[in-house]
Amino acid sequence: METGTFQSTQNSIDAGETPRVLLRRLIDYAGLFPPASLEMAAAVANYDAYLRSEHSWMLGRFIVPVARLAEFEEAVGRLSPAQDESAWSLSALPGPSPAADLARIREFNDRFAVSHSARRVRLESLEVKISSAEEIERLSKLVPAELETYFEIPWAGGAASGEMHDCIMAVARCGRRAKIRTGGETADKFPAPESVVEFIRLCAASSVPFKATAGLHHPVRSVHRLTYQPDSPSATMHGFLNVFLAAAFLRVGMDLQLAVELMNEQLASAFHFDSDGLLWREHRLGLDDISAARRDFAISFGSCSFTEPVDDLRMLGLL
């Protein structure tokens, strides 16, 4: 994708552990999905390489449709034997038959638990797109409690959407997790900053952990091409630093309008990392608050690229 203009913050000199605390296991790899849309063998090989790279500590789960688990298993089986003990953690997207997909997941985990495959693999979470609070209640009864489940919440209808509120309340009642789609291949797939802030506020108020997906290839809000095609249109994309720092600030009581301003921040130089935390404008976030937000609240985001976020963070001096 086209890379926007970033100002180097030179924070790597004295930022201490703060960037690592913020970025650890932040990026779930979704190379199978648009705009990358890689073949299974290529996506599996990429994940294997990323796990062995110097930035493996930033890598989260491999995202795969349940319908393609057999294809995934075959691709993993063709890899060379692992040279270390790195484990693969998976998150799966079910199809139209949840009960059948849950049976496939159990069989998949059971096979890998006893097999001598090239890698240690465990499918640990499920990501389900829903359209109503009732659907969340119904599906939650089918999914085992030990399988982390993220319900993708519809945001269309505005920042104050009652539907969003009802869905997140249902997620809280069921003890599950929420998911927000933060972009796509067309500009209309990007929710307004106000909608993202409202989603995060509702999650924080209900103690609902969340993840994001799509459109977060770059650290700071900026204009980029929407696909990898040379004639792709461009649009303003949310930055993953904006989203996850807004979440950490909102969790400790930041004013909503300030959080919207943070979501709209386009200057990388406005974010100052140090060994005690982060300063955005005159607003400080402590290292303990960042750590707690990442551990219990703002979990990760899915991206079809791992290298783009890493390259941009390096450009900013955060790696």
Image (cartoon, rainbow, N blue to C red):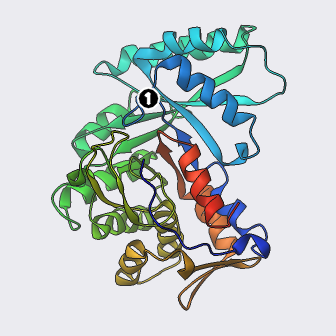
Left or right side of 161 for 21: right
Image coordinates for residue 17, horizontal then vertical, percent: 77, 66
Assign a secondary structure to mark 1.
Answer: loop
Query: Which of the 4 quarters of the picture holds residue 203?
Result: bottom left
Q: Residue furthest left?
A: 157
Residue located beneath label 1 in the image: 143
Q: Residue at x 36, y 76 (%)?
A: 260
**What's under tag 1, amino acid-wise?**
Val
Q: Residue furthest front?
A: 230
Q: Residue furthest bottom?
A: 282
Image coordinates for residue 162, horizontal then vertical, percent: 19, 61
Q: Is residue 113 above or below residue 312?
A: above
Give whichever of 116, 167 is nearer the camera: 116
Q: Residue at x 50, y 9 (%)?
A: 70
Image coordinates for residue 49, horizontal then vertical, percent: 69, 31
Q: Residue at x 40, y 53 (%)?
A: 172
Q: Is residue 285 above or below residue 96?
A: below
Give whichever of 199, 278 is nearer the camera: 278
Q: Is residue 248 above or below residue 64?
A: below
